[in-house]
Image (cartoon, rainbow, N blue to C red):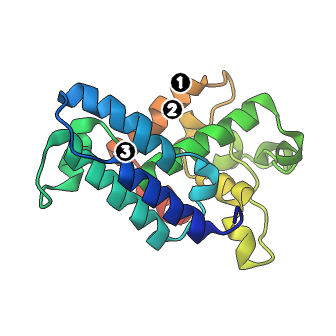
C-alpha cells in the first residue's frame, strides 16, 4: 500500500508510538534517542508528507508533542510551544516546510534531476520587465489545470519559494545548503514573514 497516504501515516504513527517509552536517561541523551528513533520516521520522505491534509499532519504533531513531553518529563497540560522552544525543535509543519524547500533549493543549485529542473523557469528569463520577483530570483508559477496539480511538489515548492525573502532566493552568489537552512530556520522560529508561505503551503 505504498500509494495509500492514510495507511502510511497510520503505520508511521503506530511505529513511532511504540518507540516512545518511559526510560530513566539523562535529558540530553534521551533527546538524541528520540530524535533518532522517533523524529527520523516522522520526517522521512518530507516531500510526500508535506502534501498531506491537515488532519494527517495533526496526527504526526501529536506524536512529536508526546515525544517532547517524554524528553522533558513534562505533564500532558504543558504548553507544546514552550517545549519545542526548549528542545530547539520545529513543529511538524515547519520541519516539513523546511526539508522540502531545502530539497527544492538543491534541485535549483545542482540542476538535477533534469525531469524536475526543466519545468522550472526564472522569471527574469521569461520577460524583460524589472519586477520584484524577476530581480529577486523568483520562479515562474505554472498555471494549474486542476486542483490536484496545486498539491504537486513542483507547484507547492515554486509558490512557497517565491514568498521567501529576496536574500534567500539570491543566485549571485548562490547560497550554500547550510546558509539556506539557517535562513529558513530563522524565518520559522522567529516568524519573520513566514505566515504567508506556510498558509500557501497547505
List x then y, in percent, for residue 78: 13, 55
SS at badge 3: loop
- Image quarter where the N terminus lies is bottom right
Disc number at residue 181? 2
Precedes in sequence: disc 2 or disc 3: 3
What residue is shown at x 60% (from left), y 46% (from top)?
Answer: 100
User: Can residue 82 be spotted in the picture?
Assistant: yes
Mark 2 and mark 3: Cα distance apart in space: 13 Å
Mark 1 and mark 2: Cα distance apart in space: 5 Å
Mark 3 and mark 1: Cα distance apart in space: 17 Å
Left of 101 or right of it: where is 13? left
| Circles 3 and 1 in contact, beta carbons < 8 Å | no
SS at badge 2: helix
Residue closer to the observer: 6 or 176: 6
Between circles 2 and 3, the one closer to the viewer is 3
Tag 3: Cα neighbours inside 10 Å, few (<14), some, or many (≥20)?
some
Mark 3, residue position: 90
List x then y, in percent, for residue 19: 37, 46
User: Can residue 194 be spotted in the picture?
Assistant: no
List x then y, in percent, for residue 190: 32, 43
Amino acid at each position: 500500500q505504498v500509494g495509500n497516504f492514510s495507511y502510511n501515516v497510520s503505520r508511521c504513527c503506530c511505529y513511532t508510538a511504540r518507540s516512545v517509552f518511559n526510560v530513566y536517561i539523562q535529558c540530553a541523551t534521551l533527546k538524541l534517542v528520540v530524535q533518532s528513533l522517533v523524529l527520523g520516521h516522522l520526517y522521512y520522505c518530507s516531500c510526500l508528507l508535506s502534501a498531506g491534509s491537515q488532519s494527517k499532519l495533526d496526527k504526526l504533531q501529536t506524536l512529536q508533542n508526546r515525544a517532547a513531553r517524554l524528553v522533558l518529563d513534562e505533564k500532558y497540560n504543558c504548553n507544546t510551544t514552550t517545549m519545542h522552544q526548549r528542545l530547539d525543535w520545529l513543529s511538524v509543519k515547519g520541519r516539513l516546510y523546511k526539508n522540502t524547500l531545502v530539497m527544492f533549493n538543491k534541485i535549483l543549485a545542482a540542476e538535477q534531476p533534469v525531469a524536475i529542473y526543466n519545468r522550472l523557469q526564472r522569471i527574469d528569463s521569461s520577460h524583460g520587465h524589472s519586477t520584484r520577483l524577476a530581480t529577486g530570483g523568483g520562479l515562474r508559477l505554472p498555471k494549474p489545470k486542476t486542483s490536484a496539480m496545486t498539491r504537486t511538489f513542483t507547484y507547492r515548492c515554486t509558490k512557497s519559494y517565491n514568498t521567501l525573502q529576496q536574500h534567500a532566493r539570491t543566485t549571485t552568489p548562490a547560497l550554500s545548503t547550510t546558509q539556506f537552512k539557517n535562513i529558513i530556520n530563522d524565518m520559522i522560529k522567529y516568524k519573520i514573514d513566514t505566515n504567508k508561505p506556510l498558509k500557501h503551503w497547505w
